[in-house]
Image (tube, coloured by chain):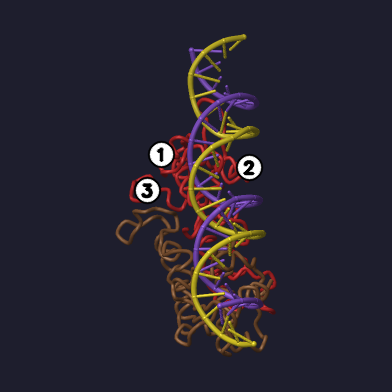
Chain colours: A red, B brown, C purple, D yellow
DNA sequence: CCTATAAAAGACATTTTTGTCTTTTATTAA
DNA sequence: TTAATAAAAGACAAAAATGTCTTTTATAGG
């Protein structure tokens, strides 16, 4: 498998797409998002539903409805998406799956992993959901295939 | 889930345990390994069988048989285990799951991910299977729970 | 050769992930 | 109020990951 789960990959791509459209004041439907990020529409629906419950994105039903992200939401870090989907263990757990592992009682890879995870966390916390909006709108960056 | 799959976690722990015992010239049975690294014995059997096919560990059947690692094998990097189990995409694929993603046509997270993956690769390539043997034998490091 | 041992192999079972389809609910606009 | 729209929700289905159990094969030692 990849680094993140499929669910997380779809979520990251979808949220970035919705963010870019939101910055133009547009709401977007599941179908459109799925087409643009190349994901199964109904499956994506479930994912967005969950992200909506978490408050990471917003949605309204009915005509002119769809998914969007409030201005403040565009400033949130990608880490919020990853944590919502992969859970905290992905970013903070022991690399070897040992529950006892800690600074005082480390597993063989503890120090090396600590370093890697720290960088991953920094990266996911410094990068915001709306950070790529302009390039996505311009078409310099794309999210499909 | 964790950073690696369960299968990979078990593999890393098991190979380290077998390595430590091998450095003392001992062969070990599935049951013993499973007990010491806290994993389901039969499931671990399949994993070790695969690692054996890949030549990462050795085994002999029958009395006095079991799993072991040749001296040269102790020098191999942990990356070999991770790649054997997770595949190359885990260490080299696009973080957002985009197949087009490359240096020339990067995804939004390409540069940041490149950095993280590079560090992960360095870590897994510089660390050898036999690196923790002494501490494991002394009991300074453990591999269960 | 015979027996005990231990991995290899194969057949399943369970759980989680991923994906599809249908029905319900909320909202807008005519 | 009605019709159309679009997300929410629920019921399944398929595939992959994880786990268990049984049978087969290879080997050492008596």
- Quadrant of res B6: bottom right
User: Which mark is first along the chain, 3 or 2?
Assistant: 2
Q: Camera-side residue: A131 or A11?
A: A11
Please say if A128 is above or below B126: above
User: Which mark is first along the chain, 1 or 2?
Assistant: 1
Secondary structure of the residue carrying tag 3 is loop
Q: Quadrant of the C terminus of chain B?
A: bottom right
Q: Quadrant of the N terminus of chain B?
A: bottom right
Q: Can residue A14 be seen in this view?
A: yes
Q: On what subunit does the disc labeled 3 rest?
A: A
Q: Is residue B118 left or right of residue A126?
A: left
Disc 2 crowd, CA 10 A, few/some/many (<14, 14-19, 20+): few
- Quadrant of res A21: top left
Which residue has dot 1 on it?
Answer: A35
Which residue has dot 2 on it?
Answer: A53
Residues at circles 3 and 1 in contact by the CB criterion of under 8 Å: no
Q: Where is residue A79 in the image (x, y as percent from the top left)?
A: 56, 57
- Disc 3/disc 1 C-alpha distance (Å): 10 Å
Q: Where is residue D15 in the image (x, y as percent from the top left)?
A: 48, 48
Which residue has dot 3 on it?
Answer: A145
Q: Is residue A27 visible?
A: no
Please say if B109 is above or below A144: below
Secondary structure of the residue carrying tag 2 is helix
């Amino acid at each position: 498998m990849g680094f993140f789960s499929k669910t997380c990959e779809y979520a990251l791509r979808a949220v970035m797409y919705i963010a870019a459209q939101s910055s133009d004041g547009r709401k977007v439907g599941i179908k459109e998002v799925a087409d643009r990020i190349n994901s199964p529409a109904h499956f994506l629906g479930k994912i967005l539903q969950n992200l909506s419950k978490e408050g990471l994105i917003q949605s309204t039903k009915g005509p002119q409805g769809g998914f969007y992200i409030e201005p403040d939401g565009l400033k949130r870090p990608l880490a919020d998406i990853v944590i919502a989907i992969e859970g905290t263990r992905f970013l903070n757990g022991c690399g070897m799956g040992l529950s006892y592992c800690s600074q005082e009682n480390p597993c063989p890879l503890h120090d090396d992993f600590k370093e890697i995870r720290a960088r991953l966390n920094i990266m996911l916390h410094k990068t915001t959901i709306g950070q790529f909006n302009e390039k996505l709108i311009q078409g310099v960056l794309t999210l499909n295939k």
